[in-house]
Amino acid sequence: MSDVKPAIDIEAVIAIAIDAGKEILNVYQSDDFGKSEKTDSSPLTKADLASHNLITQQLQKLTPDIPILSEESTSIGWDVRKGWRCYWLIDPLDGTKEFIKRNGEFTVNIALIYEQEPVIGVVHAPVLDVTWVGEKGEPARKIQAGEQQIIQVKSHKTGEPWKVVGSRSHAGDSLKAFLEDLGEHELISMGSSIKLCLVAEGQAHIYPRFGLTSEWDTAAAHAVVNAAGGEVINAENDQQLLYNTKDSILNPHFLVRSVSSN
């Protein structure tokens, strides 16, 4: 693999995410999701697999030399992954529980990781017809109904209530304790990686996550947050979240916020 970060046609990546969203919607609008359970008891549907197949096939055509790690791919061991300097990290359907509930709060997540950092991220919400795009060195964008706008994080100002985005499916005692310490706040419940994107576009000041997530859950939206002037940090040590640094693909607990919200 070249020592130079590959030049990627980000518009092609956006098109892949949108096409994957169409595959998901075909299942979403049907009567049979083909629901089953994976070995960790998390749900799996026909939509997860249809999206996975489309994304992996199209990325292999776009960048045949860049490996792909997907939530729905066969497990790739650390002995192989630890040698990857650059790779695609995808979640073909982030928010399968939201998909099954038919609340529309699910996304397609496609990220390019380079030297442990997400340098490209595309998050597409098919039902909402919204796509968030982040690329290192470029402004973050939100595309809705064909219209593009530049997005930026919004810093919290002293004296105003905090706008906090939280998980609709994973609220817990740690979040409750965090909110008590935070003070006056408004809690916005949302599913999937849309939560990170709401911070990126300034609709929320902060997203605290004290439950389990995997690296493919966060990578694409992490790139959007970075491009929008925010950060995704380890809640224990304030260090930036990094990718592919260890055998486990689980993230530590983390905070998403503007850089000046600390």
Image (cartoon, grey):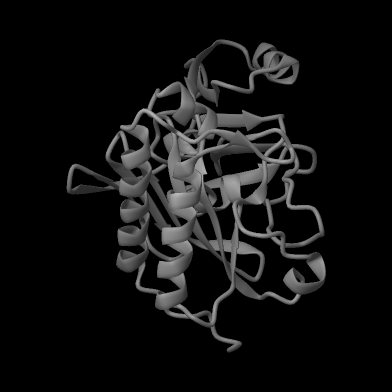
Q: Which image quarter: residue 233?
A: top right
Residue found at the far left of this picture = 146
Name the side, left or right, on which 22 lies relative to 117: left
Estimate the x, y position of residue 64 in percent, counting from the top left.
49, 81
- Residue 160 location, x and y as percent? 47, 16
**Residue 8 percent across, percent down from the top left:** 41, 74
Q: Residue 168's x, y, as percent?
A: 54, 20
Residue 119 visible in image: yes
Q: Residue at x 36, y 28 (%)?
A: 31
Residue 262 seen in the current view: no
Horizontal relation, residue 16 to residue 71: left or right: left
Q: Residue at x 43, y 41 (%)?
A: 107
Return the residue nearer the eye: 176 or 52: 52
Between residue 61 and residue 179, name the one nearer to us.
61
Location of the C terminus by quadrant is: top right
- Residue ranking furthest to the bottom: 2
Count of marks, rendered view: 0
Figure quadrant of the N terminus: bottom right
